[in-house]
Image (tube, helix red, strand yellow):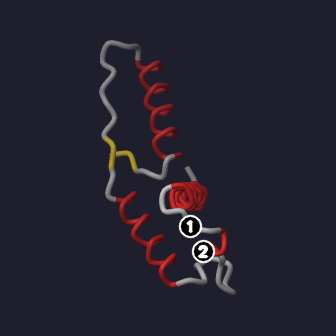
């Protein structure tokens, strides 16, 4: 999956979490003039920590030895896509 798309998904998850769990308002997510970083320093710091927490998670996919090779490949690719869509990495 495209790294930028993963970052966008992760940012959406971060903002949703902060709104729902931390009760942050929309103003907390105002972007700075560069359009990439957050205007408020505390939001930017929380975003950096959120990204770091996601980068430390690396999932190792199981073996599917009882299945034909083509089916194993399809299952592994499906799992990889789902995991990466959550902003996490899959071990090579």
Q: Quadrant of residue 63?
A: top left
The residue lying toward the viewer, choosing from 76 and 84, is 84
Residue at the front extreme, as displayed: 23
Residue 7 versus residue 63 in the image, above or below: below
The image quadrant where one finds the C terminus is top left
Residue 62 circle label:
none
User: Residue 17: x and y, percent?
Assistant: 51, 56
User: Residue 85: x and y, percent?
Assistant: 53, 46
The residue carrying mark 2 is 28
Identify the residue at image location x=48%, y=46%: 84
Assign a secondary structure to mark 2: helix
Q: What is the distance, in whole Å, between disc 2 and disc 1 at their CAs? A: 6 Å
- Relative to 82, 63 lies left or right: left
Task: Count how many numbered circles sit on residues in the image.
Answer: 2
User: Residue 89: x and y, percent?
Assistant: 40, 50
**How busy is the neighbourhood of tag 1: few (under 14 within 10 Å), some, or many (20 plus)?**
some
Assign a secondary structure to mark 1: loop
**How busy is the neighbourhood of tag 2: few (under 14 within 10 Å), some, or many (20 plus)?**
some
Identify the residue at image location x=42%, y=22%: 72
- Relative to 7, 54 lies left or right: left
Identify the residue at image location x=48%, y=70%: 47
Q: Are marks 2 and 1 in contact (CB under 8 Å)?
A: yes
The residue carrying mark 1 is 24
Residue 79 versus residue 57 in the image, above or below: above
């Amino acid at each position: 999956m495209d790294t930028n798309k993963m970052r966008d998904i992760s940012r959406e998850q971060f903002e949703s979490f902060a709104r729902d769990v931390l009760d942050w308002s929309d103003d907390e997510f105002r972007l700075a003039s560069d359009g990439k970083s957050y205007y408020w320093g505390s939001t930017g710091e929380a975003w950096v920590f959120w990204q770091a927490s996601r980068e430390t998670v690396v999932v190792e996919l199981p073996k599917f030895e009882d299945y034909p090779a083509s089916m194993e490949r399809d299952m592994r690719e499906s799992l990889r896509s789902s995991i990466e869509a959550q902003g996490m990495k899959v071990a090579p």
